[in-house]
Image (cartoon, rainbow, N blue to C red):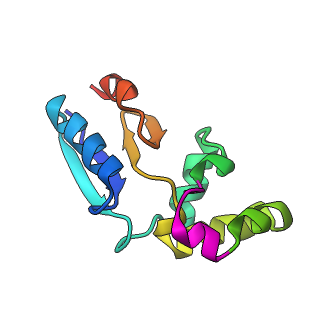
Amino acid sequence: MNTICFIGYPNCTTCKRAYKALQELELDVDYRNISVDNPTKEEIQSWIAQGVQLKDLFNTSGKLYRELNVKEKRQTCSDEELIDLLSQNGMLVKRPVVIGNGKIIIGNKIPEYESLK
């Protein structure tokens, strides 16, 4: 069985529910704390190359998103600048990010986790 990479934030209730759902499916999950180990620029570029939309990677409900006025930056900055911004602070990234079996699932999409088996 392949190991699933789970990128989340331990204090986030959504991440806790998603992680629990993966465990209930008896998947081998490696938990990565996004506040300590940000997704790298290369990882984010790889996700986009695999079909993830850049706009879907932003945690639009997060405090930091509002504090940094990222909504406006998304309209004025280049994709490269936005990817740099995401890679500099994991708290700007929508979570959880679940990666496994050739799939990347962004956000709390528990029904999709079955496809990771």
The number of discs equals 0
Q: Quadrant of residue 105?
A: top left
Find the magenta span and give its range. 58-68
In the displayed structure, does residue 102 sit left or right of residue 84? left
Percent coordinates x, y for residue 83 in the rendering = 65, 64
> Against 52, is 80 above or below?
below
Who's the residue at 34% across and 29% down the image? 113
Q: Is residue 67 magenta?
A: yes
In the displayed structure, does residue 2 sit left or right of residue 73? left
Split into 4 quadrants, where in the image is the C terminus? top left
Percent coordinates x, y for residue 75 in the rendering = 83, 61
Q: Is residue 35 magenta?
A: no
Percent coordinates x, y for residue 59 in the rendering = 55, 57
Q: Which of the two residues, 44 or 15, is positioned nearer the viewer here?
A: 15
Who's the residue at 39% across and 43% down the image? 99
Split into 4 quadrants, where in the image is the N terminus? top left
Instruction: Confirm whether residue 40 shows in the render.
Output: no
> Against 17, is 13 above or below?
below
Percent coordinates x, y for residue 57 in the rendering = 58, 52
In the displayed structure, does residue 87 sit left or right of residue 76? left
Q: Residue furthest right?
A: 76
> Against 98, is 95 above or below?
below
In the displayed structure, does residue 99 sit left or right of residue 62? left
> Against 70, is 56 above or below?
above
Q: Quadrant of residue 101?
A: top left
Who's the residue at 63% across and 45% down the image? 49
Who's the residue at 51% across and 58% down the image? 43
Instruction: Confirm whether residue 94 shows in the render.
Output: yes
